[in-house]
Image (spheres, rainbow, N blue to C red):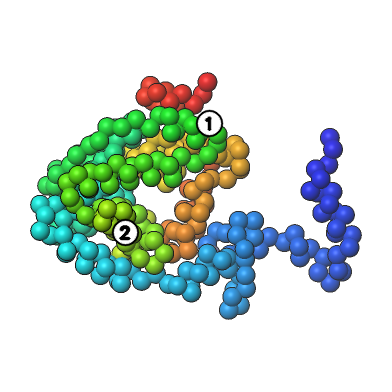
Amino acid sequence: MPIPLKYTILSFLSLYKSPQNPTKDEEELKCEICLNTSKTSKIINYQGKNICMECYYSLKYPRDPEKMRREIEETLKNTKNNKYSCIMALSGGKDSVVALYLLVKEFKVNPLCVTVDNKYISEEAIENCRRITRYLDVDWMVLNRDFTELFRDTISRGESPCRRCSERIMREVWRIAKMLDIPVIVTGHELPFGTSALKRLEGGVTVVRLLAGYKLTDEERRNILKKLPWKDPKLGGYTTNCLVLAPAIREFYKKYGYSFEFKRICAMVRYGLIDREKALQLLKCPEVPEEIYEELKRRGLDLKH
Ligand SMILES: [Zn+2]
C-alpha cells in the first residue's frame, strides 16, 4: 500500500526540523476553555493560556445575560396590546419547553405556541407539547409539513440537515406571525446572536432567543423539567424531539469522523452550559436502534437501502 502523500511530506520535513524543538509543528494544541484544538480552530496564547479564536472573542465581547433579559423584557412588554404577546416556536424538546415555562411564569405573557411538525418529530415530543401547553393553559397550534425531501437530500450527501430544517421551520412560524400580526417570535435557543438575544427579521418581526437571557446549565434545565409534565424520549445526540438527528450524525461520522454538532456543543462548554465530560459523551457517534430506522422508513425516509 503506498504511503499517503501527507505523511511522506511530513517525514521529509521532519529531517529539517530544528533540534531544539523537534515536534513543535505536529503538536496538537488544545484550547483550555472549550473543546477546540489546533485541528478545529486557530489556537492563540492569550494571557498565558492557550485558547481558541472563538473563546478569545467570547472573552473580548462577553455575554451579559442580565442585559439580554432586560432587552427581552422590553420587547415583550411592547406587544401586550395583542391577544397574544408573542409566538412561542415549540418543538417539544427540552429547551423550547423550558423557554415556554419561563415565558409564562417569569415574563407573565400569553404566547401562542406554534409547532411545525415536519413529519419527523417523535410521538413523545408531540405528546410533550400537548401536556405542557395544557399544564400552562396556553393555546397551541400545529402545522403539518413534510420535510422528507430535505432530509433525504442532506443525509444522503452526509451533510447536516439542521440548518436547512430550522430555516424552513422559522419561515413557517414567521408566516403565522405575519398572518396574525404578532410581531415577536420566541425560541428556545440559548446561544445569542452575537451579544444580543434579539434579531430583527423582515416584516417587522423580532426573534427572541429566550434562554440567552439566562445562564441555565443542562442540569438546571432538567431540574426545571422535573417539575413539569415532560418526558425524555431519549433519542441520542443533543435532541429530545428529532428522530432524524442521530442517524444524520452517524452518516456524517462515516464521512468526516466527527459530529456536526461539534461547534454548538463546543460553544456550550465555552459558556459553561455543559461540562466537558458530558459534552464529550454527546459528541461520540450515537448508537441508533433499529426501531428508529424502521420508524423513519414508515414515515417515508429510508436511510438503509
Ligand atoms: Zn476555545
Q: Position of residue 64 (x, y in %)?
A: 36, 71
Q: Residue 46 got which mark? A: none
Q: Is residue 116 above or below residue 221?
A: above
Snapshot quadrant of residue 186: bottom left
SS category of the residue bearing label 2: strand
| Looking at the image, residue 57 lies above or below residue 253 | below
Which image quarter: residue 22?
Answer: bottom right
Q: Amino acid at mark 1?
A: Ser
- Residue 63 in percent (x, y) is at 39, 69
Report the residue at 85% width, 59% height from top. Answer: 14
| Amino acid bearing label 2 | Arg
Q: Earlier in the sequence, mark 2 or mark 1?
A: 1
- The residue sitting at 52% across, 67% down in the picture is 55
Q: Give the image location of residue 297, x and y in percent.
A: 42, 23
Label disc, if present, on residue 200 of the rendered structure: 2
Disc 1 marks which residue?
156
